[in-house]
Amino acid sequence: MLLQSYHLNVFAPPCEPGAERWSVKAALDDDIGDVLPYLNAMLKGAIYNHAAHALTFRMGGHAMAIRPREIAISNLRDQNAAATEVQHVVDIINRTWDRRTEITPSIEMRQRLKPMNVFKLLPATNCKACGQPTCFTFALKVTAGEVDIEQCASLFTEAFRDKREKMMLLLESSAN
């Protein structure tokens, strides 16, 4: 186990006093810098800046950052969610470290997925079958990590095979 203990600081973002959403910073008692290239290889959509020793990604609608001695998470509903999400990230870190002999580390820096690039590859029917009011709203939520591309049923029909193949390549090569 790489990471065993940490200390939480849960706060409302300074730019939003009185906000109903929270952020958390977990000060880590252990330096976990060696796991970052392994996490970069494992976490789809992560952006790793090797020079800055920082890995950022979105999961479950939360923006997350991991540095050698810190985990930061934003857009949390309350303090309990903060503790739960930090523990979830700690578990990912420890599982990845435990499996490091099976993983090829990566220091590649992917590019952030852009909503307009996703939108251009959607069927653009605004059918609402995905649960979103428009295809552009769906594209925004895909790039935020709030919905999966598989929720667009039209994209997975034969009529949109070319767009689907391009979309899958885009998602694979980008950080979302």
Image (cartoon, helix red, strand yellow):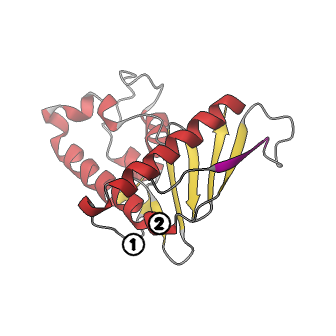
170 relative to 148, above or below: below
**Is residue 43 shown to the viewer in this render?**
no
Residue at left offset 29%, top offset 54%: 172
Going from the N terminus, do you reach mark 2 or mark 1 first?
2
- For this view, does 8 lie left or right of residue 145? right
Residue at left offset 27%, top offset 27%: 153
Amino acid type, callout 1: Ile
- Mark 2: which secondary structure? strand
Amino acid type, callout 2: Tyr
143 or 133, nearer to the observer: 143
Q: In terms of secondary structure, what is the magenta stretch mainly? A: strand
Residue 92 percent location from the top left of the image: 44, 47
Magenta stretch bounds: 6-12
Residue 173 lies in the magenta-colored region:
no
Residue 7 lies in the magenta-colored region:
yes
- For this view, does 22 lie left or right of residue 159? right
Question: Disc 2 to disc 1, how far (Cα)?
Answer: 7 Å
Q: Circles 2 and 1: CB distance less than 8 Å? A: yes
Q: Which mark is residue 48?
A: 2
Q: Residues within 10 Å of mark 1 (few under 14, many from 20)?
A: some
Residue at left offset 58%, top offset 56%: 65
Residue 125 percent location from the top left of the image: 34, 30
Task: List the single residue furthest toward the left.
Answer: 158
